[in-house]
Every structure is written in structure tokens, then in C-alpha cells.
Image (cartoon, grey):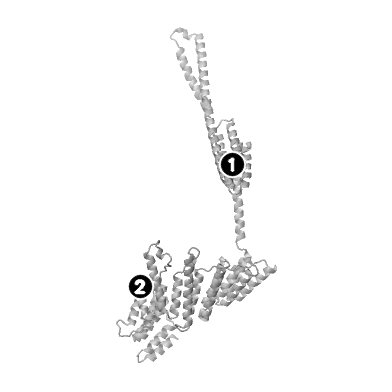
Amino acid sequence: MKADENVRTVEGRGSQASSTHTSQYETPTAQSDTPDTITLSTTNTLESSTQSINQHTAIMGTRIQRRRTAQQTVLMICYCLASCFYIMLATTSSGGTNKTISSTTTMATAAASMIISTPRTPTRRTIRSSNIFSSTSSTCLLAASSSSTSNGTNTDRRAGRSSRASSSPSAITNTNTNTNNTKGTKRRSRTRHHQQQQHHRSASSPQPEFLEFNAKLKRLISKKDVTAAEDLLLKSLQQYEDGSGTLRPDKFHFGIVINGWARSNNPSKAEDLLRRIEDYYYEDGKTWLKPVVVQYSSVIHALARSTHRYGNHAAQKAEDMLRHMERMYFEAGNVDVRPDKITYTTVITAWAKAAARGSDANASNVHAAMRAEAVLQRMLHLYGTDKENFEDVKPDVIAYTSVITAWCNCGKVDKAEQMLEKMETQYQAARRSSKDDDGFADIVAVRPNVATYTAIIDGYRSEKSEEVFHRMVERGIQPDVASYTAVLHGLAHSTCTCSMTPTPAQRAEALLKQMELPNSKIKPTTATYNAMMDVWAKHGNNVSRAEAVLRQMQHLYTSGENTEARPNALSYSSLINAYAKSKHRNAALQAEKIFREHR
């Protein structure tokens, strides 16, 4: 297209030149019209046109040659820059071996020579093909350079292959074929990667037989038949060892059965199965049955739940299990059984429950509270020595509240309150100080919550309960239904005389009305109303008010306004107790009537 346009342009200019020459040779004489004159004019015009065409053809050829030279020069510079970049990468990664540098130089020289010796006129098609080849070659160079960083020997071998491929004439001329091959290679690579992912998923995902075995164990445990689940587990392991079975039970299957024994309140069975796992791993060499922290935590939790039956014995076994885990971690280096915050807090809870057994302030209960605080100090010591490695052992408000509950359960509420005030002091000091203050860098500042205060309010069971309650509210901690119920119990056990104004019963009723406000987010429960009736029975000397509380509970529950206020046996017993302590003349008949109504 361009060549035709150029020819037409030259012809047009030649015609203009012909007309110009014609006008120059025209004379006003009559001799210009003779045949000889016309022949001479025509000859001169043709010679001038031919000279103009030759001049314009030379100019166009020069322009085309310059354009081709410029394009070839740009392509050569691109190849040289890519080769230099590859040389720098190869030298940096593999130490600059002579083999790599020589192969790269050969590739660059061959590419440059092929460009310079290209005899064709650079049209749009050839320029586009050259650009494709340039981008493809640059991609190959960068890929080879990145591969050389991983393996020096493979780098040299791949560089040699790249040099031979680059120096091959077919690799340069068949640019579209190379592009298609590159796309095909990428497509095959993606397909291979997808197949590998599918294989990895199929290999890592549980097999149907594995899932079916899990379902069998959980089904037996849900039916409270943990013995059958353990028998099935041990039988499957024996069949695998004998070669008669293909399913190999692992530590997760044992964990399911251990958790089943723990939930069935049978810590001894759970502990026996855990000891069996330890024998399998440490003595028999069954590496796939390595014990983990979850299994030990399940046993400790089961022991903590059984302290109401076994007392200090169960709590001591829980702490012994904790010490066993510490020895395996610190001495044997088994990181899979390292105890965490939950493990330590569960042991503290076990001692707190053990401190509530028997009479208050006996030697056994005080010992349990002391052991609970010792475990807390152990957590503080580990966190203080290495904060980075023992961040998950840092005690939280649950650990502190469990120790305070232990002191309250054994009757030492004053020590519990001392710990509470210490928590408040450390928290306020850390809050006022900056983060860079070294004076508070090692202090574990934990703010008490409503459960912490409720433990002390319920522990006092006296007029001090009300004092702690108001102190909690003044410090910005919102009470809940448990704290309201605890302070009502405290007012019921108050030793104040009824001559005080207002009386304990009146103060308790004022607190109850706060909970019954329309905009209140806290609604009284059955325990709250029972505590209120207990207050009227002991301090009000007004049995009618206690009976009104019971009728209110019945109305709230039957109307659906408060489904948590359903009267229970303790509600009727509290009202009967109120009649028994009152001076009502028909107290016995009214108590019997209430008893028959409840029955």
C-alpha cells in the first residue's frame, strides 16, 4: 500500500515538473507550433520527469534504510541490555562462573548478528514478531537467572541450553511457534500444579474408613458407653499391629476416648488410658501416638470436676499431672505437652473447689487455698523470667478470681480482699504510668471484674457484702444478677438489729426494685427472689411481704414476663420458714396450706 502511494506521489510531482518545463520552452513566435519544436519539447519533458522520479526514489530508499537501521539498533540494544542483566544476576547468584558468562555472551552475540544480518524490510509484521521474540527471550533469561539462585550446577546446565536455543536460527525465525510453545508450557505447568494440589488434598484429607471409625467412637460415647469405645479402639490398634487390619488408630482417636472418660466424671479411667499412650510412645516406639497437651488437659479437667467427691486428693493428682507435663517439657524437651494458661487455671480451680469442702477455715481447706495461690505464683514466675516464650502462661482475671474464690471458700475472706485490693492498686498504677516506665514493666496488671467482686461479696455473707458491692459500683464495674443475689444473701445473714433505719430488709428490697425497673438490663431470677424472701423471713418480721414476693414470682412466670423467676422448692421452703419465725397466729395453718399447694 505504501509503495503504491509513493509511486503515485512521484508521478504527480513529475507531471507538475513536466508542465513547468513546458511553460519555460514555450515562445510567442509561430515556430513553436512546428513538429520539430513539439518533438524537442516532449523529449526535454520526459528527461526532466525521469530525473525527478530518480531523485524521489533515492530519497524514499534512504528513509526506509534509516528506519530499518534504527529499528535494528533498538532491538540490538534491548538484547544487549537483557544479556547484561542476566550476566549480573548469574554472577551474583553463582559466583560468576566462566561457563555461564561465556554462554550468555554467545547468546547475545548470536542474537545481535541475526538482527544485523536480517535482509528484509522492517514492516509492521516483522516488527511485531521481533517484539514478541524479544519479550519471550527476556522472560526466558529472567526465569533462568532465578533458577540459578537455587542450584549452581543446574544454572550452568540451563544457561548452556538457553545459549544453544538462542543461537539456533529456528528459535529466532519461528517466533510465533515459540510463543505458542511458551503458552502450551504454561498451560501444562498449570495443569500439573492443579494435579499436584488434588493429589495433596486427597492424601491429606481423611479417608472414609478413618471418618467412619471416628463416627463409631463418638456414637458409643454419646450413648454413655465409653467402655465399648475404648475396647473398639484397642482392638483396632491390635489388628493393625497383627496385620489383620488396615486402619491405624492415632492420638486423636485416643483423645476422643479420653475426653469421653473425662465427661463421664471418671478421671481414673482417663488417666489410665493416658498412661497407656505414654507407654506406647516412649517404650514401644509408636511415634504416631505421641501424647499432646489436649489429652493431659482433659484428664486435669476431669480431676477438677471430681473434687467435690475426692477433695484434696483429686486436686493433688491434678497438680501432679501438671508437674509431670512441666518435667516432660523442661527436661525432655517435648513441646507438644507444654502446659498453657488453661492448664494452670484448671489446676487452680481444682484447689478452689477442694477448699469449699467441709467446715470453713479447717486445715485441709486452708491448705487447698494455699496451693491455689502457689500455682498462681508459678505462672507469674514463668512469665516474669521469659515473657516471649511464656506469653500464653500469663495469668488473667480468671486465674486471680479462682484464687480469691479459694480463699473465700475456706473462710479467709480477708486474704481474698487483700488480693483484690492489690489487683486494683497494680491496675491503677499501670494505668497512670506510661508504657516506657520501667517501674511497672514487670508488673502483671489485671483489672478485677464483676466475678472477682462477686466472689468476695458472696464470701462475706454479712453487712460487709453491701460495702463491697457499693465499692464495686463506685469503681465503674456494672453489677450482674449474681452480684445482686450475693448482696441479698449478705443482707439476709446480717447481724444488724431491726431498729436501724433503713433495715436490712428495706435495703434489700430497694436493690430488688432497681433490678425490676423497666429500663434495667438485669432481671431477677428465682435465686434472687428466694434470697429476698430469706431477708424478710430473718429481718422483716413481716411474713406478708415474703408471701407477696412468692405471688409475684408466680405471676411473672405464668404471664411470661420473666421466665427465669419460676418458683421452686426452695421458694416455698423460704416462705414456710418465714411463717415459722413470725408471730402470726395462724402461721402453722398457713405453712401447711403452702406445703399442700406446692405438693
Dot 2 amino acid type:
Val
Residue mark closest to the camera, 2 vs 1: 2
Could you tell me residue 4's position as x and y percent? 53, 27
- The C terminus: image quadrant: bottom left
Where disc 1 sits, the SS reads: helix
Dot 1 amino acid type:
Thr
* Horizontal side of residue 2 vs 475, given as left or right: right
Q: Marks 1 and 2: in contact by CB < 8 Å? A: no
Q: Nearer the viewer, residue 33 or 257?
A: 257
Could you tell me residue 105's position as x and y percent? 59, 38
Vertical arrangement, residue 92 with respect to residue 52, above or below: below
Label located before the other in sequence (2 or 1): 1
Badge 2 is on which residue? 473
The circle on residue 179 is 1
Rendered residue at 52%/28% (across/down) = 66
In the picture, residue 224 is in which quadrant?
bottom right
Tell how many labels.
2
Q: Residue furthest right?
A: 243
Could you tell me residue 123's position as x and y percent? 55, 32
